[in-house]
Image: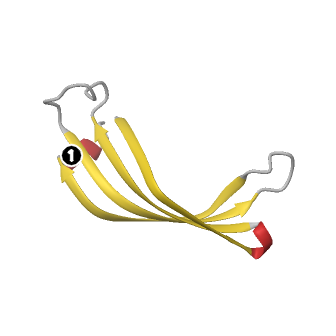
Amino acid sequence: MDTTHMISNVRIDLKGGGIEAQLNCYALAQHCLKGEGMDGEGRKYLAASEYWVDLVKVEGESGGWGIRKWVMKIIWTQGDASVMQRSG
């Protein structure tokens, strides 16, 4: 499957002295069958979602962030949902 995700309206709220955070954003995800992304007539499935993500600061040299919990609410969809089915 070929997929493109676009993220917008990202809001981050730092908590716990800067070692925890809550992130909220919107996403559009366009899905199509492998190799058919450039086919204007190919089957596609578009989903708009809102994400709520709980983050925690990772200890060590990387200083990055890890995902503790990720909740996605699909707001609307458009197109052919069968594109999302795994082929056997």
Q: Looking at the picture, how far across and down is residue 34, in whole percent?
A: 31, 29
Q: Is residue 4 left or right of residue 22?
A: left
Whether 30 is drawn above or below 20: the answer is above
Based on the displayed image, in which of its 4 quarters is residue 22 positioned?
A: bottom right
Comparing 83 with 79, the one in front is: 79
Amino acid carrying label 1: it is Ser
What residue is at 77 percent from the left and 56 percent from the top? 58
Whether 14 is drawn above or below 61: the answer is below
Q: Looking at the picture, how far across and down is residue 10, in whole percent?
A: 51, 59
Q: Is residue 60 left or right of residue 39?
A: right
Whether 28 is drawn above or below 74: the answer is above
* Colour approach in the figure: secondary structure
Q: Is residue 85 left or right of residue 80?
A: right
Q: Residues within 10 Å of mark 1 (few under 14, many from 20)?
A: few
Based on the displayed image, in which of its 4 quarters is residue 41 positioned?
A: top left
Q: Which residue is mark 1?
A: 82
Query: Residue most toward the right?
Result: 60
Quadrant (top left/top right/bottom left/bottom right) for the N terminus: top left
